[in-house]
Image: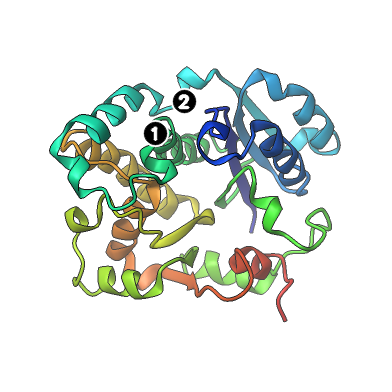
Amino acid sequence: MSFTFVTALYNISREKHDQRSYQQYQLWFEQTLSIPVPMIIYTEKCNEDILNRARAKFESITKVIYTDLYDVPFYHTSKTVEHIIKNTPFKDRIQHPNGLENRCFEYIPIVNSKFVWMKNAIESNYFNTDMFFWIDAGLSRFMNFDITDGDFNLPLITKIMNEDKIYFQVGKVHEFYKVLNEQLYFNDAVGKNINFMMAGFWGGNKKIIHDICLLGEKMYMEEYIMKEQVDNEQVIFGFILKKYKDKLLGVSPNNIEYVNYYLFCNKVT
């Protein structure tokens, strides 16, 4: 039983829209990188010093893929996303026009690129691991424990592997229930920025996650871009998960942010 974490960080100048500076994300990123597990990291060359510091002790289990922002898988759709949000009938379906998704036009391409990054990481499988988990670059900001201690919930991880489960945290419980029970349909959800699942930490066995990411990549282009409607990756993910009802291991939200990562690290009693 073995697993790889996959993460990414690129500067899309989001401080212009929600006051979260890239410098703040770099601090969170460095903490996230301190987790003592195999990691595949997609980022810009400007973060090389951060990588060298954070992963110095883990050089043998670290693969860094430096690219420019313009080489991010779906970055090339940014202008199309802007056009869809500003100049098509879809703009009247947008429920939260002041939300980050609808003001920072690089955001939707970046977060949906997780599907491609994960797919590519699994296909490369640099460390020959059984399982893959996405972790957001800034997830460390939610953790009120020492994420460097290397303590993991082996019974939980064994269950994920042996039962081929998709491990994730549920976002909007009521809305996700509607998706699973055919009471809410994809085209009706797009534009509402519904976090059916929390996309900061999720994963499972390489085969099932690869299949999910292939489908996510396809849906981004065919169901968002080609149909002139766009939203975050959580919406696509919610409707993908519906196809895997018997494989879901979803953690219900409580008063701990990303409690699914706390459980993964054996920090919930």
Q: CA distance from mark 2 to mark 1?
A: 8 Å
What residue is shown at x 40% (from left), y 59% (from top)? Answer: 195
Is 40 placed above or below 194 here? above
Closest to the camera, between mark 2 and mark 1, is 1
Q: Position of residue 103 (x, y in %)?
A: 39, 36
Q: Quadrant of residue 62?
A: top right
For mark 1, give the secondary structure. Answer: helix
Crowd rating for badge 2 (residues with CA inside 10 Å; few <14, some 14–19, many 20+): some
Q: Which residue is mark 1?
A: 109
Q: Is residue 159 above or below residue 232?
A: below
Q: Mark 2 or mark 1, which has the lower sequence index?
A: 2
Q: Secondary structure at mark 2?
A: loop
Q: Camera-side residue: 231 or 215?
A: 231
Residue 225 marker: none
- The quadrant of the rendering that contains the N terminus is bottom right
Q: Residue at x 63, y 42 (%)?
A: 137
Q: Position of residue 174 (x, y in %)?
A: 35, 75
Amino acid carrying label 2: it is Val
> As rendered, which of 59 and 87 lies closer to the eye?
87
Say left or right for 150 vs 239.
right
Kindly identify the residue that appears in the image at 39 percent across and 42 percent down.
Answer: 101
Q: Nearer the viewer, residue 228 or 201?
A: 228
Amino acid type for the residue under numbered disc 1: Pro
Foreground residue, 263 or 175? 175
Tag 2 residue: 72
Q: Is residue 6 above or below residue 143?
A: above
In the image, farthest residue toward the bottom: 269
Task: Name the quadrant of the C terminus.
Answer: bottom right
In percent of the image, x 27 and y 26: which residue is there? 80
